[in-house]
Image (cartoon, rainbow, N blue to C red):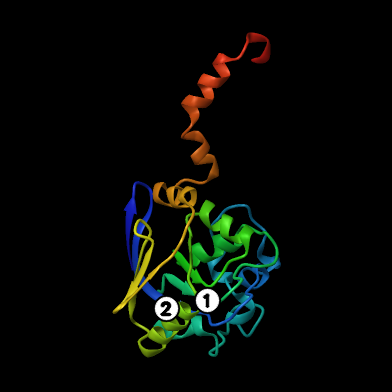
Amino acid sequence: MQTQASDAGINIHTGRIAPLNQANVDTDQIIPKQFLTAVTRSGYGKHLFHDWRYLDEHEQVLNPDFALNNAEHQGASILLTRENFGCGSSREHAPWALDDYGFKIVIATSFADIFYGNCINNQLLPVQLASHEIDQLFAVVEDDATVEVTVNLQEQSVKVNELSFHFDIAEQHKTSLLKGLDAIGLTLELNDKISAFENSRPLWQQA
């Protein structure tokens, strides 16, 4: 896994893919409600996909049929999945869990809107590709689980072997990720303009 940062954010990332060949993965599957007991962003990775990863409630027995438990996918930093990923509740713990597990990028056909925004705010890059492009990526990983994929945010490209795909992303979201800023950080970049506006108001409005 290799990440080339731009300032404090992400620009170019090269890593292996973990395939989750399933549509409509909701946030309760990503991080079940019983683990939403803290307000910090760490410690959720071990509970990621709890109901699928483990055969017991105490997380002692791994499910050998779940793809992320396969030895060849350990250390993968890119999650590959299908449409409507992150649907369900709006819990921000979902991208926290994905990031804490080690994922830096999620590639899917589509994302739930709130989940997508939560990813941007937490420096987890959501990449949306066409269904036939997703199919090609699944085929590549099935053929070689160790293959490395390069995602270039500046160029908005996904490259592996001879394949190259372009993805769209709103300019504001792209800027947030490149600079490593959440919504508050973006607002603080305008601090001088905000202060100038406040100081230009009549005194009776500044109280």
Q: Identify the amino acid type marked 1.
A: Thr
> Could you tell me which secondary element the residue under label 2 belongs to?
loop
- Of residue 140 and residue 15, the one placed in the foreground of this image is 140
Q: Residues within 10 Å of mark 1 (few under 14, many from 20)?
A: many
> Mark 2 near mark 1, Cβ–Cβ under 8 Å?
no
Q: Is residue 195 above or below residue 133?
A: above
**Residue that appears at 64% across and 75% down:** 24
Residue 108 at x, y percent in the picture: 52, 72
- Label 1 secondary element: loop
Numbered mark located on residue 74 in the image: 2
- Which residue is found at the position 52% from the left and 36% from the top? 187
Instruction: Give the farthest residue toward the left.
Output: 162
Q: CA distance from mark 2 to mark 1?
A: 16 Å
Q: Indicate whether 51 appears above or below 36.
A: below
Residue 81: mark in rendering: 1
Residue 117 lies, with reference to residue 18, above or below; the image says above
Residue under the image location 42 percent in, 83 percent down: 136
